[in-house]
Structure formats: C-alpha cells, structure tokens
C-alpha cells in the first residue's frame, strides 16, 4: 500500500496545467486541439473561472480556445485525501504568463500584416489559485470533479484585460 | 520564450547593442535644480565668450553654465547656488584679456531674483505647447523656439542633450495629462534624450516622430513594451523608412503591441486585437452555486472568522477526529511589494508546501488530524484580523457543492492583518529572532459537511499564506456585481443565521457569539434616526452587496419597501442604468 497518498498528485497537476498551456501547433484540427485542453476534467465537471461558473467541460474548452497562450508554473500546492472516498481536495498556487502578441490560442490575430514566423510576446507573471477535487489518479483520464481557477494578481505592465 | 519581466521597467538594456547610456535622472535633477542663480559679466570683449567662461572656471573654480550674450553685450549665465554667486562676485575686477571683468548678480525685470529660471522657463514652455482639450503636447521644432534659444538651452551640444530629459522631469512633476505628443522636426538621431518618455507619459496614445534623423530600427528597442497604449505612431520623414518597409512595420508592431496605425496605414484590426487581449471569462469576486449555499457559506465564513480572530479555540468543536488541517506558505507568488520583506517565520515550521517537500514522513507530519493536533497548530499561528465587512473588497469567494460528501467547498481569498504573536511560540524554533507582524495574503479552502447531530463539521481545511495582493478586474463595477446563477450580489456580509435544508446550523456555530453587525454603527445618525434596526441591517447588507453609496443604497431599500428580495430584483433591473457615481 502506498504510504504517501500525495505522491501521484504533483505529476497529475503538472500534466493538467500543461494541458492548459498547449499550443495548437501539433494538432491537425480545432476539435482535436480543444479536447486536449483540460482533458482531465470530467464532462460534467463543476468549472469556475474568476468566479464565473462555466456550464460544462465543453463550454470551458471552447472559451479556453479564445484565450491567449499561457504558461503556468506551480509555486505551492497542498492536498487532503478525504477518508473513505478516494477523493482529493487540492489547493494550487502559481504564476502564469499570457502571450501579449495579440493572437489567441488558435493563432488568430488582428494583424493585417502577417509575419512568416510570428513571435510570442509573453507578459509578466500573473498570480493564480486553483482548487481541485479529483478522484484517485489512475487508469481513468477524466478525474476532475471541481475546477475553481482564479487570477489573484495582475501585473501593472500587462496589456491583457481581465 | 523570454522572461520579459526581468527586464521590464528596469531599463537594463542600456549599454547593449551600442546604445549610449541615457542621461542619469539624478543628473537631470541636478541640471534642473542647479544653474539657477543668474550672473552677468561685463568687460569681457577682448576675447570670445567661451574663453571668458573657461577663464572664470580656471581662475575662480566656478562653473558658469547656460551662458549667452545679452542684448546689452554682457554675458549672462547661471551658477549653482547663492554661495557660488557670492564667491564669484568677489572676483569682480579680475583682469581678463586686458580688461577688468565686472561681475554682478542678474535680476529679472521685476527686480526679483530669477532662482529656478530653468524650471520656470521650461514650465512656461510646456504651458504654451500643451492643449488641454485635446491632451496634446506639441514639442515640434523646439530648437526654433525663440525663448528657449534666448535662454541658451541649445547653446551647446551638452545643454541641447539635457533639454528633453529636463522637460520630461518637469512634465512628470506637473502631472500633465497627455495622450498625444508631436516630437517632429527635432533632429533626433536616436531616442537617448527621450528615453523617459514612456515613464512620463505612460498612457500615451498618439506619437509623432516625423522628420527626424532616425535611421535604425533598434533605437526603438528601448521603448519595447513600455508604450502599451500607443495606438498611432508617425515616423515618416526619417531615414529608417529607406529600409525594407515590411520589416519596419513588423518590428514596430512587435515593439508596440497595441499599435493600430503607422504613418496613416492601418496595421491591425482593432476590435479583433482587443478581443484577443481579453481573458474571455467575466470576473466576479463572489460565486455561490445556489441560494442555500449562499446562506450557509456566508454564515459559516462570518462566524468562523469572527472566532478565528477573537477566540480560536472555540472553533475546535467544528473539527472531529478525521478532520484535517494544514497550512502552507507560498513565498513565490507574484506581488507588488518591490523588495519589501514579509516575515513568514511563524508559518514556515508547519508549512506543507508539497512542491517543496519530498519526504513522505515530513508530508504526514505537517498534516494535522483531529482536534488536538489542529488545536496545537492553531495556537502556533499569529493572532489575526480579517476585515471581511470593513474592507469586503479585499476578499473573494467561491462556494459550491461537494457531491460525494454531500458537503460544500468554500474557497476564500484575501488579505489579513496579524495582530498578535502566537499563543504558543517555541523559542527553540525562532531563536532570538524578532518576528514581525504584518499584512499577509491568504487562500483558504474549507470542506464542510453536515454532522450526524444536524450541525456542521469541517472535514478539510487548507490554509495558504502568501504575499498580499489585491486583484482589480478591468471590468466595470456593474460587471462585477452581477453574479451567475446564485442570487443577489454576494458579499461576505453577515446575515441572520439561516439553516439550509438538510444542513442545519451547527450547534457550535449557533452557540458562538453572533457575528458582529459592523457597518450599522457607521451609518450617519440622521439615517439611523429615520429607520428601525432591521432596516439599518438591511441597508448595511445592501450597501455591502451592491457596492452602492449610501444615497443610492437608501433609495434602493426605500423603493423596495425594505425587502431584501425586492432589493435584489430591483438592483438587477436597474444596474445597467445606474451612473458610476452611484457606487462607492
């Protein structure tokens, strides 16, 4: 028996945040790309972003497609395994950068003059808090029941509007 | 991917890529503040003005700057202080080029000393060049300005190079609201003399550098990501446009991410750009999944923090044998404190930041289970004050169902003040170090479930301590005040204890002292005298929840017959038509 129930959590949350940071370069179409964004969420996952409830995983993925590219880093996390449930409550604090080049995650841009090699222009660090309720990480891919994400710090020099 | 944050705002790029070091702000201050005492020198005509000034510098060891020849034939210049002026006057009569120099202090026509002449001149110049209605500052062809020339601002390369930095400094002090600047026809070869323009005018929207001598794209690098509101930019009439135009446009677009128009050409679709730069989720400080959760969670938080800040041990009845508590410290979260030291000492011993702990034993040691362990940990935390009512804008909260447990998860975020040292602080842990009490940021996640006796239990309690940050959404107050499926506008305000179906008020919480009713005492006496206590409570609640000011809050209550539900409906119906000054 695993003596440390928190052991599988860190790889899981890193993978989850990586899935939010994916760029569309490796995907053939929008659908396959969108389904990979937050793929660990259950279809009926309770999603809240900055205090706004999102009705479903699909709706979340559609909206997340419209965000600028992101880059998340974890600075703190803690979790409790709820006895008898195999359910974890996880608190994550971290920092995130947004691409300020004016393109969304799909590469759509308002630029009327197009560069052959568009460059990212990452912002300064924002702060975020993420609270999760998940099933025991294992064979199932979709294990997130609750996903509560909140930006708690916005740098002064950013052009991203939140 | 670059870590732009390291370089932004610090101007670390000087010296790279052949850039000259720009004028030091301290030098600019000196320049502005010095040279303020005017002196006049007669009897110098046996040689040139420069020879005379150099002679004085050698002989008297006093520098006369900004020298020029007055219509009466005298040299007029400036020294740094009254003392220097006095010392120089002692040299009056000294022989130079076969004549005796006559040195006097210069006075303005109204007879007052022209101390601060440079500042006054530039201030006057700014006034004549600033058009307030259009927020336009016309700095075109400054070297052709008769007054500035007469004052010798462009008498030498040295003084010319100091003019714009001095102007920026003075404009900054004057806090002129500028959206457009015309810097055309100024013979600028680079931006070295106007590097501080983005700091002086951070909200600049339109800028013209037309008809200068800018020839290299890299000169603009110094302003990268510093003019984030620049919308229109004119650089026509500069040799830079002899380069590949497409490259010029792309590079300028990269440096100025919100630029729409360059030399009259539209480079970006503005609505699409603004859409892409907006995080596509509405931001609201409070979210409750439904009415019951709203009531339960606000009651819980109000009562919990009332005790947390006053009598922490009374909270232990909410924790049972399997209840878990842990505290973790995040010292890496981004913040604005700019080097200010925050003392996390009291939390570090028990910190369960799992991104920094790898040993399983340690992870388990820092997880407190059951009343006794949790009590012990609570006692090691500093005493605190959470201003949930007084400063509700410092807090945000989400509360939603935890279906597997038939419970509720409450996530609360904000800042608190440390008001006292912990009840139990082991000298061994902290040695002789004096631990400072200060403001901290926090996130706290509660899992609360119904207890068999009809009360409530805290099943899980995770506290994160971090640097204090205040997040202000770009959205208007109206957008912030319209929550989703949950009712009303939901502050962490006290409300009468409400027992939700299937989740009665915990006996412990009921036994606890009722939450303070702060805010009522803050109502003006004339208002209090007009309404009863229940109405006063409603008014405070409405003020907190809507962020309306007293006048509008009172009107809302009155027009809603002092009924909370009606207030909520009426507020929602009128929120879009309320003026901005209706809010606090």
Image (cartoon, rainbow, N blue to C red):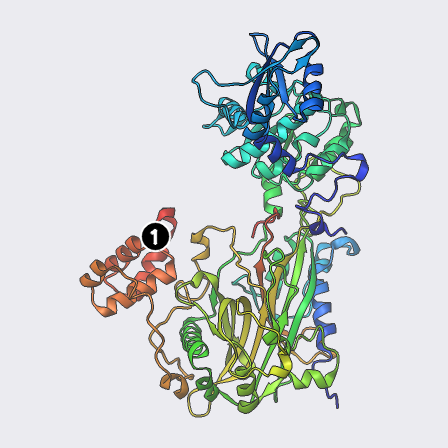
x and y, in percent, of residue B117 in the image: 53, 25
Whether residue A10 is situated above or below residue B203 in the rendered picture:
below
Q: Mark 1 — on which chain does it sit?
A: B
Residue placed most toward the observer, B506 or A45: B506
Q: Name which residue lies at 55% across and 32% down.
A: B170
x and y, in percent, of residue B226 in the image: 64, 41
Q: Residues within 10 Å of mark 1 (few under 14, many from 20)?
A: few
Q: Name which residue lies at 66% across and 44% down.
A: A102
Residue placed most toward the observer, B316 or B417: B417
Q: What element does badge 1 sit on?
A: helix
x and y, in percent, of residue B113 in the image: 48, 23
Q: Give the farthest residue toward the left.
A: B530
Residue placed most toward the observer, B79 or A122: B79
Task: State left or right for residue B414 relative to residue A1.
Answer: left
- Residue B199, quarter of picture: top right
Residue B389 appears in the figure: yes
**Residue marked by disc 1:** B574
Whether residue A147 is situated above or below residue A103 in the rendered picture:
below
Residue placed most toward the observer, B51 or B329: B51
- Residue B360, quarter of picture: bottom right
x and y, in percent, of residue B223 in the image: 68, 38
Task: State left or right for residue B158 relative to residue A54.
Answer: right
């Amino acid at each position: 028996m695993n003596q440390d129930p928190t052991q599988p959590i860190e790889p899981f949350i890193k993978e989850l945040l990586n899935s939010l940071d994916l760029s569309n370069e490796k995907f053939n179409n929008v659908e396959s790309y969108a389904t990979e964004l937050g793929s660990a969420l259950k279809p009926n996952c309770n999603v809240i972003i900055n205090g706004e409830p999102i009705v479903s995983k699909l709706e979340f993925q559609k909206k997340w497609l419209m965000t600028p590219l992101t880059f998340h880093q974890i600075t703190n996390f803690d979790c409790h395994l709820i006895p008898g449930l195999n359910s974890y409550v996880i608190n994550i604090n971290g920092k995130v950068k947004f691409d300020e080049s004016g393109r969304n995650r799909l590469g759509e841009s308002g630029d009327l003059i197009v560069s052959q090699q568009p460059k990212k222009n990452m912002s300064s660090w924002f702060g975020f808090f993420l609270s999760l309720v998940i099933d025991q990480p294992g064979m199932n891919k979709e294990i997130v029941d609750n996903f509560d994400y909140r930006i708690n710090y916005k740098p002064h020099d950013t052009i991203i509007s939140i | 991917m670059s870590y732009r944050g390291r370089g932004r705002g610090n101007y670390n790029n000087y010296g790279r890529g052949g850039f000259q070091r720009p004028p030091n702000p301290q030098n600019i201050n000196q320049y502005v503040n010095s040279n303020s005492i005017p002196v006049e020198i007669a009897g110098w005509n046996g040689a040139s003005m420069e020879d005379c000034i150099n002679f004085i510098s050698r002989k008297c060891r006093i520098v006369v700057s900004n020298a020029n020849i007055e219509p009466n034939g005298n040299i007029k210049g400036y020294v740094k202080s009254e003392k220097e002026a006095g010392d120089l006057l002692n040299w009056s009569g000294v022989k130079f080029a076969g004549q005796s120099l006559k040195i006097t202090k210069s006075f303005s026509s109204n007879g007052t000393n022209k101390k601060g002449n440079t500042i006054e001149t530039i201030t006057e110049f700014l006034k004549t060049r600033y058009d307030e209605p259009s927020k336009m500052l016309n700095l075109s062809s400054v070297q052709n300005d008769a007054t500035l020339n007469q004052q010798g601002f462009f008498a030498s390369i040295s003084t010319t190079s100091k003019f714009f930095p001095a102007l920026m400094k003075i404009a900054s002090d004057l806090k002129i609201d500028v959206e457009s600047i015309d810097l055309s026809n100024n013979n600028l070869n680079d931006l070295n003399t106007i590097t501080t323009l983005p700091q002086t005018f951070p909200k600049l929207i339109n800028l013209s550098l037309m008809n200068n001598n800018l020839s290299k794209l890299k000169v603009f690098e110094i302003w990268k990501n510093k003019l984030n509101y620049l919308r229109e930019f004119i650089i026509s009439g500069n040799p830079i446009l002899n380069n590949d135009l497409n490259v010029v446009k792309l590079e300028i677009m990269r440096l100025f991410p919100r630029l729409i128009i360059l030399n009259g050409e539209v480079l970006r679709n503005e609505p699409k750009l603004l859409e892409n730069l907006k995080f596509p989720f509405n931001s609201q400080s409070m979210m409750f999944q439904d009415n019951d959760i709203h009531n339960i969670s606000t009651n819980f938080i109000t009562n919990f923090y009332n005790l947390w800040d006053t009598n922490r041990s009374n909270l232990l009845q909410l924790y049972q044998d399997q209840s878990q508590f842990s505290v973790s410290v995040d010292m890496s979260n981004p913040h604005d404190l700019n080097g200010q030291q925050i003392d996390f000492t009291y939390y570090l011993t028990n910190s369960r930041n799992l991104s920094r702990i790898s040993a399983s034993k340690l992870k388990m040691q820092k997880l407190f289970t059951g009343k006794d362990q949790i009590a012990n940990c609570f006692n090691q935390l500093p005493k605190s004050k959470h201003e949930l009512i007084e400063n509700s804008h410092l807090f945000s909260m989400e509360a939603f169902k935890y279906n597997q447990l038939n419970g509720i998860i409450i996530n609360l975020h904000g800042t608190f003040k440390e008001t006292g040292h912990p009840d139990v602080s082991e000298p061994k842990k902290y040695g002789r170090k004096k631990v400072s009490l200060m403001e901290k940021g926090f996130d706290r996640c509660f899992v609360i479930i119904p207890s068999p006796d009809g009360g409530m239990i805290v099943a899980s309690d995770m506290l994160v301590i971090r640097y204090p940050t205040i997040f202000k959404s770009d959205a208007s107050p109206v957008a912030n005040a319209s929550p989703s499926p949950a009712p009303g506008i939901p502050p962490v305000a006290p409300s009468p204890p409400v027992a939700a179906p299937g989740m009665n008020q915990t006996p412990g919480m009921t036994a606890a002292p009722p939450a303070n009713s702060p805010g009522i005492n803050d109502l003006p006496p004339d208002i209090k005298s007009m309404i009863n206590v229940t109405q006063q409570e409603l008014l405070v609640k409405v003020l907190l929840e809507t962020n309306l000011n007293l006048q509008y809050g009172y009107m809302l209550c009155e027009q809603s017959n002092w009924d909370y539900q009606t207030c909520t409906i009426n507020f929602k119906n009128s929120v879009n038509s309320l003026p901005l000054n209706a809010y606090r």
